[in-house]
Amino acid sequence: MSATSSGSAVAPAVASRVRSGRLTWRLFTLVGAVVIGALALSLLILTVIASRTANAAGAQALDRAAQLVSVLLTAREQSLARAATVFVQNPIFRALVLAENADDLRDQSGEGAERTGATWVQITNANGVRLAKSDDMAAPRIPLTGSALIARALGGDAATGFGASSDTMLLQVIAVPVTVPSASGEQSIGAFMAAQVIDSALAAKVKEATDTDVIFYVLDTAHAPHVSSSSLGRTRPIQDLVVRATGVLAAQHIDSVARFDVRLGDEAYVGRAVVVRSAGGDPLGGFLALRAQGTELAPFESLRRWILLAGVISLVLGMLVAFLLARSIAGPVLALASAARRAAEGDYDAVVGSASRDEVGELTRAVGTMLLDLREKRSLVTLLQSSTPPTPIRGVDGTTTTIAIGSLVAERYEIRSVLGSGGAGVVYKAFDRELGELVALKTLHPEAVAQDPAAVERLKSEIRLARRITHRGVVRIYDLGEHEGTYFLSMEFVAGTVLSDLLERDTRLPLDAVISIARQLARALEVAHAEGIIHRDIKPQNIMLRPDGTLKVMDFGIARLAVRTAQLTQVGMAVGTPGYMAPEQLMDADVDARADLYACGVVLYECITGVLPHDPSNPVLMIGRIVSGAPVRAPHDAVPGTPRVLSDLIMRLIAADPAARCQSAAALRLELSAPEIET
């Protein structure tokens, strides 16, 4: 027996932990997926932006590098040309050119190379025949008129251009005329040509200024490119790169290409290629400006790493928070589910824990309120089950039944039995043949209608209002009919016990049962008052308790027509039951919802103490004490153990001054919902 009980207790706990784990991991995974997705999207956007920005920055850098190369080449060219012009103006040099003395001119070529900073210098006569070359003392005397630069210099103009040497060096070349004064002006007697190698020093300057690598290349006689100088050296991969780039230029027959992409080992480069030509227009070589893509991407790579690091940290923290949050949600939700299962099995004592201020907290409070109501109803149900069902009342207080049992009313309602009678008339249990269900028929005393010719119209108006109340705590009124001169009301049939019968048997009710009655009554009045309807005759006789503990308020809309009871016979007195009527109602003054709240307070006082606040044995004296606000013994003094908060609330409800009471049924319901009411 013990093993079985233990196993049945462990199984729900294990299942609860499994469900908790599933919910926790589901939320955990969901948050993780959201964080990872956001991180991936951020990195993707950054990559796209970085690529575009790097491309634009790389293109600008390549443009600057190409412009700088052009500026440096132009500056070298101009410097070489100025130095050569100064050198050829020396009279001794001119005389030696005229004399065409080979030995002297060889010396002059070497001195000219030194003075101009050229790599080599060669000198021609007026016919373009080479007389000397600085780097080749045995250079043959051959005509150089095929050189466009020499031809222009012999024509009297300085010329500049590019040249190639040994298929491995790219040169900057200038040629200036050598002239002597004559009768007609200046006479050309030869040409001075100076060449300067474009070496790695120039490439290094560009690299230093623009952080862009430069490769100079030269074309051989077969138009195959060869590296001349480079800031990257003259390795085989560099040579292959030059071949690929010049292939692009040759294929497109252009002098420059704005952009091309290449790889050198593990490094990706973006480049720009420019062709240089001789003075005659033949391509001699050119240069490539290369920029590592990582140069522009470096700041973005750093940012990417920081974003990735921050994302990983956020992911860890986010998933940790998600895990804790999921557990904080799963725990209360599972506790509520467990409480709901226990309630379905009839156990209303589950504790749902403290409620937070979020949606889960709202749900927790709602479940807590439901369990509290169920616990209180349980006490009320127990009380009802222990009571003896009341005997149907026939002709109470001399009232005689006007409709025979078994007769048919209005050709629709079959009278089954008499449920009771009161100030307004007799209540019958009837079967509605048209709808096929039980209803209650309440006849109205003919004399009650006869006393006021406008009573029927007023009753119809109030019935129309009362029919708008559809709350489960109010007995619904269906229709007003007439049978053989007697008006009757058809209304919802409720099987249960009238609160007055319960009080006659038990006098005082258990506290849980009283609180349940109070809360249900307050809610019913709240709904009715929201529709602008005041009952005016709240009393135990008008409160029905169903076997399941549900409270039903009866006679909404007909209180104005109730006949005066034996306790109140004076002409001019207001409608109602004196012991439960508020002072302003007894004085026949205008009443509002607070009059019903006064009656509610009297009902609760009677449920706790078993007596009315004021002694009803002498009606006149009782009315005087109610109107004057005579002191009343508090419930907690009359019945020790009554919670002080509940006792004080009841005393405020039965205050003679309406302003001292709760000002609405909604406010009363909120006060009754406070946990302190039960302690």
Image (cartoon, grey):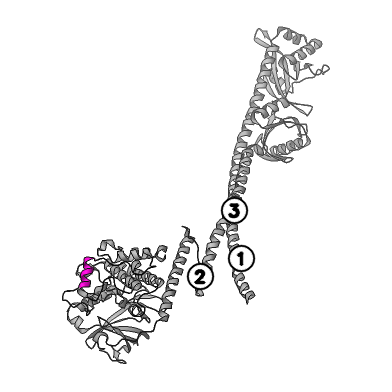
Q: For mark 2, does the 10 Å Cα neighbourhood hold few (<14), some (14 to 19), or many (20 or more) residues?
A: some
Amino acid type for the residue under numbered disc 3: Leu
In the depicted view, which residue is nearer to us: 275 or 391?
391
Secondary structure category for the residue under label 2:
helix
Residue 676 circle label = none
Image quadrant containing the N terminus: bottom right
Which residue in the protein does label 2 denote? Answer: 340
Which residue in the protein does label 1 denote? Answer: 18
Give the magenta part as a residue range.
Answer: 621-631
Toward which corner of the image does residue 526 lie, by quadrant?
A: bottom left
Quick check: 489 left or right of 284? left
Which residue in the protein does label 3 denote? Answer: 320
Residue 37 in view, yes or no: no
Residue 57 in view, yes or no: yes
Image quadrant containing the C terminus: bottom left
Quick check: 640 left or right of 185? left
Residue 664 image position (x, y, % from top left): 31, 64
- On whether residue 622 falls in the magenta region, the answer is yes
Amino acid type for the residue under numbered disc 2: Ala
Q: Earlier in the sequence, mark 1 or mark 2?
A: 1
Total numbered badges shown on the rendered structure: 3
Tell me: residue 616, above or below residue 418: above
Secondary structure category for the residue under label 1:
helix
Q: Earlier in the sequence, mark 1 or mark 3?
A: 1
Q: Main secondary structure of the magenta part?
A: helix
